[in-house]
Amino acid sequence: MREFYSLYAERLGAICSRYIPDKDDMKDVFQESLIRIFTHISDFSYRGEGSLQAWASRIVINEALNYLKETKRYELLLLDDVVEETEDEDPPIEEIPPDEIQRMVSQLPTGYRTVFNLYVFEDKSHQEIASLLGIKERSSASQLSRAKNLLAKMIRYYNDKHHPR
């Protein structure tokens, strides 16, 4: 357990914090994830390099999603399912530190952030996201569109403030 923790805790903690930005809540969810990982390790089947990390990551994501469902933190997902137009040009992010980008993502409303993380970081389709969250595919697409638009506004604001033209 100690070796597993030293190898994977930082990465798994980062995954958990993408979904649960409140530090105390994140620690609780992460602890529950570790308990689930250690008590279900016999369910793991080795499928090559990286399979343990992928299996543990899925458990952390599922625990985070369960927490959000139980606390009704993503009720925004149930709003209308109209896909908004995205802006043509993505704002430049080259000069923004990665931790600042992470902070911006963590400030997205829970529903937007959840869909954004599942789509961007976990490479889930809208169909998979809809199934995971119990929503319509169009709601997933709508939430992603809104997340991208809001994130683009945050990035533009940051760039205007720190890198005026």
Image: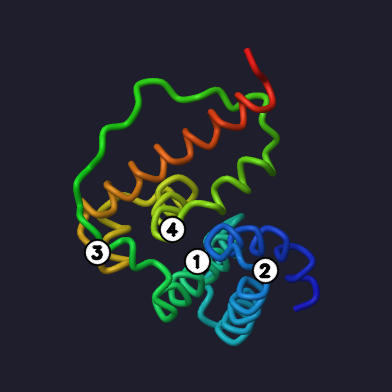
Q: Which numbered mark, 2 or 3, is in the foreground of this view?
A: 2
Amino acid under label 4? Thr
The crowding category of the residue bearing disc 1, from other C-alpha atoms within 10 Å (few below 14, some 14 to 19, many at least 20), is: many
The answer to whether marks 2 and 4 mark residues whose Cβ atoms lie closer than 8 Å is no
Q: In terms of secondary structure, where does tag 2 sit?
A: helix
Question: Which of the two discs, 2 and 3, labels the residue nearer the N terminus?
Answer: 2
Nearest to the observer: residue 39 or residue 111: 111
The 10 Å Cα crowd at callout 2, few under 14, some 14 to 19, many 20 or more, is: few
Q: Secondary structure at mark 3?
A: loop
Residue named by callout 1: 61
User: Which amino acid does the dot numbered 1 rest on?
Assistant: Ile
Residue 124 x %, y %: 37, 52
Q: Nearer the viewer, residue 56 or 77?
A: 77
Note whether 146 is above or below 162 in the view shown.
Answer: below
Mark 1 vs mark 4: in front:
4
| Distance between mark 1 and mark 2 Cα atoms | 16 Å
The quadrant in which residue 6 appears is: bottom right
Q: Looking at numbered disc 2 in the image, what kind of residue is underneath it? A: Lys
Please name the residue shown 61% across and 55% down the image: 49
Return the residue at label 4. Answer: 114
Mark closer to the observer (3, 1): 3
The residue that mark 2 highlights is: 23
Quarter of the image for the C terminus: give it.
Answer: top right
Of the image marks 1 and 4, the number of the one nearer the N terminus: 1
- Report the number of numbered marks: 4
Residue at x-position 45% and y-position 25%: 90
* Residue type for callout 3: Ile
Q: Secondary structure at mark 1?
A: helix
Q: CA distance from mark 1 to mark 4?
A: 10 Å
The answer to whether marks 2 and 3 mark residues whose Cβ atoms lie closer than 8 Å is: no
* Residue highlighted by disc 3: 135
